[in-house]
């Protein structure tokens, strides 16, 4: 009897197991989501946020190397260790490229052409910027996971070819958009428009970025000029504030903190945690005449009125003279009665308790405080409270590139007219359009007038007309471009290596700082984990589009 019962139980168990197997085969396990089930908007959000994080990281490096903010190293070799760029490298590959590649095939199944176009453009910018900063980088074998843990680096020129192909592909995808195309729920750059208009803005950006990358290769690519001329003739480039490519921040401080990164750094309860470069403040406020540049009250906020009253124990350079290798035309210490307090390039002295006397980033682009000469110590409750922008591509930038192309390549347009248009556009963006978007009222007596703008552009015109030759004229163009780039260190660093301009840059405070950083060391996460990676021998390794001589830079 017992044997019979055991046999019966065995039969029941076998039947039950078989039945469960058949039942499970018809069910979907909610804990085993498939890639095609992923939300394209969430993927897009991840790509967009990682992209701007990468932009901020690379821009910070460029700002320091081009004297917008101070460089705290007496030698360029020691300025940025391989570990210093681990975050940007990881953000680029794991944050932008990996998520973009994962999203595209999912979006293609439902004809999400705007989604596809956006991530291809952001992917292109990311790849181009990796080349600009590091040189040869992995692409063709990258982001394959376990299938290839040691991707080889592709030549920078080959990656640039892929960048142009990605931008062309994005333009094609965006050209398929109709009024019924499903739009992203979270376009963080050009959202709020109809599908067709949203696609049109991204197409304009794609063509503008094509121009940017072509101009960066004009010295090494004899096919670039025809392509540059075609883009200029087509005239679908960013040239209005409505088309500007910016990331917009809010004044929200917690959960999450979505304020501008410079506001977070400079507006704290203990004062600023970094220094603006004396070189940049001097060029804006002094070089064309005291306060002639209408942007200065928007760019900077002074917490004190007289730097010469600062104790020597705090600002020791006040007691000394400029280093002997400094030209007389560049600032040193910049301590004067007007209250601008920053640091010189390469100053590695200790940090005194001076956070509440340092000059701060102002209303543009950081969402800080407009300088109304009130000389009040700032904290995290003042100004636009971080509601600023990352100026990734502004309309003025396009005019300056076109001025360069017209001057050096005889491309369409009058170089002087384009130069002046760039300067006017930058001033108007900074002093009128941007403040209106962040809700900070400019006092009536501080509103910039047409006469002030005209006075400024007259000086620029005279500088251009009095320039001795074409290269001197280009220096005027690049100088104005540099002044308009406040908040964008990527373009200032690229322009400086590509042209060696502006010429009159403040040297490193160390007379022998070593070779200037023509590219960054490869990050440690690349060289230590990739069997095919080889670290550079020096920071003087040039990216493929940089064919300038070693001595072109003020170091």
Image (cartoon, rainbow, N blue to C red):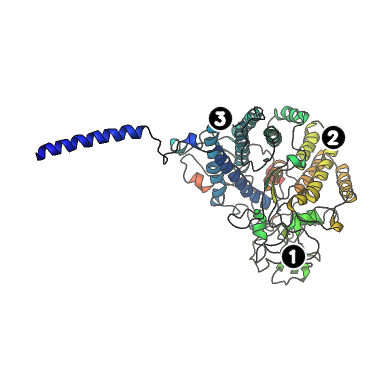
Please name which of the two marks, 3 or 2, marks the residue nearer to the observer.
3
282 or 96, which lies in front? 96
> What percent of the width, then of the height, locates residue 74?
64, 57
Residue matched to label 1:
303
> Mark 1 falls on what kind of element?
loop
Q: In the figure, 293 relative to 468: above or below?
A: below
Residue matched to label 3:
108
> Mark 2 falls on what kind of element?
loop
Distance from the alpha carbon under mark 3 to that under mark 1:
53 Å
Residue 543 in sight: no
Judged left or right of residue 232, residue 202 is left
User: Dividing the picture into quarters, in which one does residue 119 lie?
Assistant: top right
> What percent of the width, then of the height, locates residue 212?
70, 37
Distance from the alpha carbon under mark 2 to that under mark 1:
42 Å
Confirm or deny contact between disc 3 and disc 2 (CB under 8 A): no
Please name which of the two marks, 3 or 1, marks the residue nearer to the observer.
3
Residue 473 in sight: yes
Judged left or right of residue 368, residue 462 is right
487 or 82, which lies in front? 487
Judged left or right of residue 243, residue 108 is left
Distance from the alpha carbon under mark 3 to that under mark 2:
43 Å
């Amino acid at each position: 009897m017992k044997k019979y019962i055991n046999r019966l139980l065995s039969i029941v168990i076998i039947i039950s197991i078989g039945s469960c197997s058949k039942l499970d085969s018809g069910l979907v396990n909610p804990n085993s989501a498939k890639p095609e089930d992923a939300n394209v908007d969430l993927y897009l959000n991840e790509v967009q946020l990682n992209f701007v994080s990468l932009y901020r990281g690379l821009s910070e490096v460029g700002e320091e190397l081009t004297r917008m903010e101070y460089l705290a190293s007496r030698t360029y070799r020691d300025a940025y260790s391989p570990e210093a760029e681990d975050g940007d490298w990881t953000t680029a590959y794991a944050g932008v490229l990996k998520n973009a590649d994962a999203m595209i095939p999912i979006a293609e199944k439902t004809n999400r052409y705007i989604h596809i176009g956006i991530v291809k453009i952001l992917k292109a910018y990311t790849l181009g910027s990796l080349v600009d900063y590091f040189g040869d980088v992995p692409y063709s074998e990258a982001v394959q996971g376990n299938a290839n843990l040691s991707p080889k680096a592709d030549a920078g020129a080959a990656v640039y070819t892929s960048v142009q192909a990605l931008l062309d592909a994005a333009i094609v995808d965006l050209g398929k958009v109709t009024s019924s195309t499903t739009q992203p729920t979270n376009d963080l750059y050009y959202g709020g428009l109809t599908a067709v208009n949203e696609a049109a803005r991204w197409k304009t950006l794609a063509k503008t970025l094509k121009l940017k990358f072509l101009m960066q290769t004009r010295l090494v690519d004899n096919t670039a000029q025809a392509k540059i001329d075609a883009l200029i003739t087509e005239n679908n480039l960013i040239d209005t504030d409505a088309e500007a490519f910016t990331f917009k921040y809010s004044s929200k401080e917690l959960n999450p903190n979505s304020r501008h990164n410079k506001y977070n750094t400079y507006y704290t309860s203990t004062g600023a945690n970094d220094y603006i470069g004396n070189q940049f403040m001097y060029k804006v406020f002094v070089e064309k005449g005291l306060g002639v540049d209408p942007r200065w009250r928007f760019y900077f906020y002074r917490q004190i009125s007289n730097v010469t009253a600062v104790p020597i124990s705090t600002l020791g350079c006040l007691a000394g003279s400029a280093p002997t290798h400094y030209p007389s035309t560049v600032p040193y210490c910049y301590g004067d009665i007007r209250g601008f307090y920053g640091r010189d390039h390469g100053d590695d002295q200790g940090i005194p308790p001076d956070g509440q006397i340092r000059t701060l980033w102002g209303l543009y682009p950081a969402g800080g405080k407009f300088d109304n000469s009130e000389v009040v110590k700032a904290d995290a409750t003042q100004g636009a409270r971080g509601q600023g922008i990352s100026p990734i591509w502004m309309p003025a930038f396009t005019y300056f590139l076109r001025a360069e192309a017209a001057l050096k390549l005889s491309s369409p347009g009058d170089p002087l007219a384009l130069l002046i248009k760039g300067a006017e556009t930058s001033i108007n963006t900074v002093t009128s359009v941007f403040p209106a978007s962040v809700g900070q009222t400019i006092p009536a007596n501080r509103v910039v007038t047409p006469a002030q703008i005209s006075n400024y552009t007259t000086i620029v015109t005279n500088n251009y007309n009095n320039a001795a030759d074409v290269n001197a004229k280009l220096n005027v163009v690049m100088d104005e471009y540099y002044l308009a780039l406040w908040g964008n260190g990527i373009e200032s660093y690229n322009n400086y290596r590509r042209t060696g301009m502006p010429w009159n840059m403040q040297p490193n405070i160390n007379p022998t700082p070593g070779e200037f950083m023509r590219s960054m060391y490869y990050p440690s996460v690349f060289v230590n984990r990739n069997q095919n990676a080889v670290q550079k021998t020096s920071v003087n390794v040039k990216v493929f589009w940089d064919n300038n001589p070693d001595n072109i830079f003020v170091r």
